[in-house]
Amino acid sequence: MSDEPTQQSVQEAGLFADPPKTPEWNEIRLDGNTLRLEDILPLLQGSPVVITESAYTVVGNSRRLLEDAMREKIIYGVNTGFGPMASHIIHYEEMVNLQRNLIRSHAVGMGEPVSSSFVLAAMLVRLNTLVKGPSGVSRELLEQLLAFINKRIIPVIPEHGAVGTSGDLVQLAHIGLALIGEGEVIYEGRRRRARDVLEEVSLTPYSLKPKEGLSLINGTSFMTGIAAVLSLEAERLLDISLRWGGAALEITQAFDDYISKRLHQLRPHEGQRWVAKRLRVLLESSKRMRQRDMLPSVANQDESVHKIDEEVQSVYSLRCIPQIVGPVAEAIFRTRKIVETEMNSATDNPLVDMENGQILHGGNFHGESIAATVDELKARLVKLIMLSERRINFFLHRGINKKFPPFINLRQPGLTLGLQGLQFVATSTAAHSQSLAFPHSVHSIPTNADNQDIVSMGADASLMLAKVIENAYIVFAIEGIVLSQAVEAERIMDDLSLPVQTAMKRIQGIFPPVYDDRDMSGELPRLVELLKAEDWDAK
């Protein structure tokens, strides 16, 4: 057995493989099959989106097949009512009104508007699923949605409303509402009436064709768009956690066998081994890590019991980083695979089977795949927050670390309070995250006259994941401050590994070491923003 995961084993597991390289072109090309997480960041940074001509051809063929079929066959949502009213047949001349009524009746979300980045990602995912072809929409609808994306006309989507089965009906309906010139949008930073913005940019409100209202709202694109953005954030948090973990090992002069190749070869979980390897790479320039043979010898001791000053083993939050963070890494990379599969899936109902000339009715709109993966990721990230909070406690608790002054107070304990106040923030934020860790996808409540008798709650699960990620940045920022303060207390900056040294200096540039108590309320948010923007990759 090799001492590291082989490329073959990595590929077979579907984990930890390097993502494909980003193409050299600046635009995001959609064909319904190749959208990746790496396309999300360029989208949010302003890259234009284009649809390939081959995709337009596929869409055109699918639309023609649907139009031929709907004149002769009963097709759900095209010439029938919706949900429990599917047995009501709709006359051909009313099919357009049916689609408009669907959008208007479902665009009833409540609560605060969802982040524009989530909405833009959801629009991209929805466009890609329509471009795939089986939804049976027209080229004109694709071009309307494409124009909204490229002009950054962002529909206002309230946070509450979707149950994640039959798709994200309510939230996606708000996108459809804007396309037809109704509702509200965010444009150039201002919340405005959609109709006014369309007039300003010379876009005509779209007139829905048969099935197109259903194709817009029937699917998982809202929860998937959010999950795509948050998957990237989770990968960033993993990098920060690894760097902070490495810093903690260095500051405490931990033994290097905690992350040794051989130790983790003996329990060869992919994630555990990957984390241990990342830590070894991170710390290879460290002057602080110790070898086990640096402990004093027990030979020739006269006493039957002899106490030494050395700590033979560290607390778990230091000693077990690969074992704790390994499952988190596996969950993050598993999420990437599932989200990318969903981004390139047909999640509408019914779907056009062009190969066999059939209209397929089913349930590809059910959001359980995304709901389950974001719930798992949410729980794993909460464990990462708990790990960070425990290390914060270790460094601030003199009774445990037996080294640093209380709350790493660098001035006069008793008169000055050091980092005592920040620990309260870390503790409360971690506790809040623990409450959010419960899997929301098990909160299935039947709805829609029990037509939707078991639902995914994937959209709300994704929004809860967003809150956990925001909490993680806060706790990680506080841990970074604590580590930086410990480095200052020990005067060991020059002995740290180069990556950790760089991180500590960047933290101190925004949050200088605390000697005298000061108002820190403005510094912590700036540090959180640094964590979100900085490249903390531990390679």
Image (cartoon, rainbow, N blue to C red):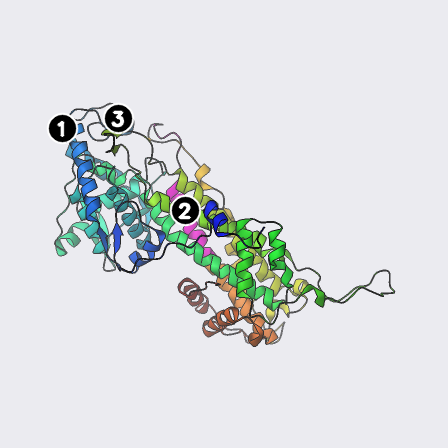
Categorize mark 3 by other alpha carbons within 10 Å: few (<14), some (14-19), many (20+).
few
Indicate whether 491 appears above or below 54: below
Indicate whether 11 appears above or below 208: below
| Relative image position of residue 492 (x, y in whole percent) | 59, 75
Residue position marked by numbered label 1 in the rendering: 92
| Relative image position of residue 363 (x, y in whole percent) | 33, 32
Helix, strand or loop status at disc 1: helix
Observer-nearest residue: 411 or 202? 202
Residue type at numbered disc 2? Lys
Indicate whether 170 appears above or below 309: above
Indicate whether 300 appears above or below 110: below
In the picture, measured across the screen, residue 515 lies left or right of residue 186, that is: right
What secondary structure characterizes most of the magenta part? helix
Residue type at numbered disc 1? Tyr
C-alpha gap between disc 1 and disc 3: 17 Å
> Which of the marked residues, 1 or 3, is nearer the chain's N terminus?
3
The reply to whether dot 1 and dot 3 touch (C-beta < 8 Å) is no
Q: Where residue 75 is drawn, which disc sits there?
A: none
C-alpha gap between disc 2 and disc 3: 37 Å
